Amino acid sequence: MMNLTAQTPAPTTPAVIGLTSIEAEERLAELGPNTLPEPEPPSPLRVFLIQFRNPIIYILLLASALSFATGRIEDGLFILVVLLINASIGTYQEYSADRAAAALRKLEQPSARVIRDGVACRIEAKRLVVGDLVLLESGDRIPADLMLVDASDLRCDESLLTGESMPVAKGRTVEGSSGETASSMLLAGSLVTRGRAKGVVTATGTATMLGGIAAELGRASSSQPPLVARLAKFTNALAVFVGLAALVLVVAGFMRGLPLHDLVMMSVGLAVSAVPEGLPIAISVALAVSMRRMAARNVIVRSMPAVEALGSTTIIATDKTGTLTSNVQTVTEIRLPDGTDIALDAHADLDKCEIRASGLDSDLVRERARRLLRAALLANEGTLARRDDLWVAAGDTVDVALLAAGRKAGLGQEELNDRYPLAARIAYEPEHKYAASFHHGSDRIHVFVKGASEVLIEMSDRMDSAGNVVEIDRASLLAQKEEMAARGLRVLAFAEGEIGASLAGSLGHGHLVDLVLLGLAGLQDPVRPEVPNAMKDCHAAGVEVVMVTGDDPRTAAAIARDAGLSFHAGQVVSGHDIDEAARAGDQRLDEITREARIYARVQPTQKSAIVASLIRNGHIVAVTGDGVNDGPALKKAHVGVAMGLRGTEVAKESADLVVTDDNFASIVAGIAEGRAAYRNIRKVVLMSVATGAAEVLLFMLALPFGLPMPLLPVQLLWLNLVTNGIQDVALAGGRPEGDELAGPPRSPLEPVLDRTMIRRVVQSTVVIGGAAFLAFQWMIAHGYGVPEARNITLLIFVMFENVQTLACSSERRSIFSVDILRNRFLLLSVLAAQTIHISAMYVPWLSGTLGLSPITPLEWGLSMLIASSLVLVTEVDKFVSRRRRDRSSHA
């Protein structure tokens, strides 16, 4: 449990009159400003250098060094240029993402009203110090941890800290009581929704509860993005492969008696062949394109690997308040005393909604509901008014919710106040649990009361039944209240009465007699309208969803049902259960999180423990939230998703993604984009690895047959970085295929090169490398010079790349069923690769460097015919795979 008491001893009585300016400045110099530490953003140079921390980059740097050492300056420079381009792209993308996130930050400087030198004044919140006397009223954000010294009808919204959706009543601790309680403490970051107060600052900055959470966020995240982990394994395996292949080549060369220079050149060529130089650029492009698409769908990406991490997600641990719900209290149901139930549309336009009632007595039901809402509006201290075509509210969230319900019923607060002039008012007090107002009538005083249902049921002696006033049935009303509360509703009751006009001068609690109970109203923080469909999409996509909230289990379960979350009673656990399991050890906690779907009454530290347990259970975890209390869990998860509209800065800075419209459905759209990005990365990996492996196979076959080096290192660079590179970028930026959410997420243990990819790489390697070798051997045997044979062999590889690019446009569908025009850039990249390669044959300085020469139409046609053999192999493999999936799906 988080300690809610002050971390610095509360000041003594003299501090209640406030500090002097001199005292405040001394304490500010001693304790520092009332701010949270902000991480210093890395310099552009540091971001640029980080781009080189990649095993593929290390291999390329080694190949460049070998090229320079053997005099192949063109090769070495070519590799370095590519590395610089890749690093520049990565730096630009990260800079752009940080700018987009920074644009979400609030520009206003928070302030606070304090007593300084005996005078009330407003200062910057960062200049608050321990001992300051702060003045608060409805609508103020609490600037530091405070101990109350005076309060009147005070309620605070602590949802962004604790997850509790309902405002919390606050009051002074009675002198002589046993210690401080949470009700006398005001926490930095919470909001005053009602009343006025004075409080003495007990902690500022990092010493506040908010500061404790921020300190937790300062620790490095223990989770690694799935893409980073997969690519690390892939590149490490690739490095081992290159090393073994080079060793075999050198040993075979020594056995043949080749000179050292030729062996070094062949080793350089092999390294250039095996390493997919364009892969880092292609991956950056794939993630950058998805970042732009996500931005168009209201998701700002702050970390590029988070794009794919969201697509890999197997479970979403979502906050309730402000994420699944609107974080706005709303009247969703009116229950009349005779059991008549009236539903109000939680998300209706206040100007268009009306009370819907069916049956013969529809008009009577509507009139009885308006009578109840009249009492709700007159015994109300909030305001709801239209300004510049927007509804602007002030006051307690419950009062505002009642005003909105009245507006839906066609009732206006101003019109009612004009009709019933106010005579006196009894403000809501926690000890009374009701509020009342007295209004002048023609010859009577009208009394209207709202408050806790059990209190008003006891206060009333009659009730409305079918439009008639009858004796109250308290047992029936209490049963109705319990039934509504069991569905997660906060239940209020409303009553009215009349007293003689002669009593107008002495109105008070004692005049709340002969009341007629008008009915009950159920309030809740309603589920966002788009959430149920988004839940269905998650289910279809095989992504589990769990709710983690600070609310009580009953409310959490009711909201979960409305949201479309599937669960049973045994899958609802509390923060207390989490604490007990954690004390028993990780194994016990992991057993709970394997089954639980709703976590209620959860504290921030418990959220982090839940996320860590889900990760131990093998999940790729996404955490959504908007509050300060969500920050540690957002940081610990594989991908943190913060809400942009209502989210706190702590949540946004902790997250990898920010949803600018606070729409849970946008997260699901982001999952689809993330899966599409990973599909594109797989396509690029298949293209690059298969081409590189085919080049290695060509070298390995040429050596035992005594053939010269089939391709020069500079030709391999041209092949891998220019012709192949153009098509890699096109594959990386390919459009989603549309079925990304049609199946479950891939296993967290799945490598980049899974069984399907390895099979297809082997097939392509054998076809491309084998065909190129046979063509090269045939040309050498039939009198072609080595430069001419290399020229045509290079063209054959370009042709194979063209064919494989088209074949890779979809992993599952036939090349003949894919709408190539849907990704016009892909088709253009194939044409561009051909055009650039053929054009290079006619550019003197380029053809000389690359060893190219013009070819005849017959040679071009034969090369295309050879490359077309790959289509047959690829189509057969896809057909067999589809049949196998169809059989398994019907089994």
Image: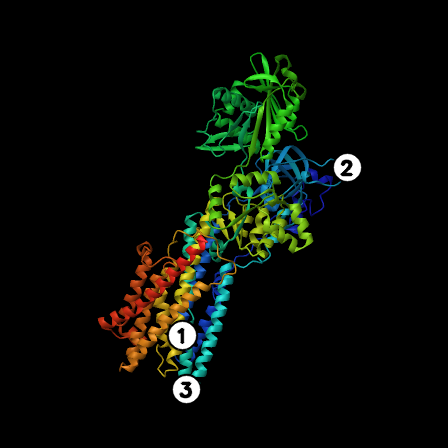
Task: Classify mark 3: helix, strand or loop.
Answer: helix
Q: Is 329 on the left-hand or right-hand side of 253? A: right
Q: Which residue is mark 1?
A: 696
* Residue closer to the observer: 31 or 700: 700
Label 2: few (<14), some (14–19) or many (≥20) C-alpha neighbours in 10 Å: few
Instruction: Point out the frontmost of discs 2 and 3.
Output: 3
Q: Secondary structure at mark 2?
A: loop
Tell me which numbered mark, 2 or 3, is placed earlier along the sequence.
2
Regarding residue 812, the answer to whether it shows in the image is yes
Q: Looking at the rendering, which quadrant does residue 5 occupy?
A: top right
Q: Position of residue 733 (x, y in %)?
A: 38, 57
- Give the residue number, with chain letter if any, for mark 2: 176
Quarter assignment of residue 351: top left
Cβ atoms under marks 2 and 3 closer than 8 Å: no
Mark 1 and mark 3: Cα distance apart in space: 19 Å
CA distance for labels 2 and 3: 97 Å
For residue 256, which numbered disc appears in the image? 3
Residue 663 percent across, percent down from the top left? 48, 44
**Looking at the image, is mark 1 or mark 3 earlier in the sequence?**
3
* Furthest residue toward bottom: 257
Direction from residue 864 to residue 42 in the image, left or right: right
Task: Provide residue 830's location: percent of width, then percent of height.
Answer: 31, 63
Task: Look at 42% across and 66% down and name the residue there.
Answer: 759
* Type of amino acid at the residue the image marks with label 3: Arg
Earlier sequence position, callout 1 versus callout 2: 2
Between 672 and 628, which is closer to the camera in this rendering? 672
For the residues bearing labels 1 and 2, Cβ distance under 8 angstroms: no
Q: Residues within 10 Å of mark 1 (few under 14, many from 20)?
A: many
Circle 1 sits in a helix, a strand or a loop, which is it?
helix
Would you say 356 lies left or right of 156 here? left
Which class describes the residues within 10 Å of circle 3: few (<14), some (14-19), or many (20+)? few
Q: Answer above or below: position of 713 versus 157.
A: below
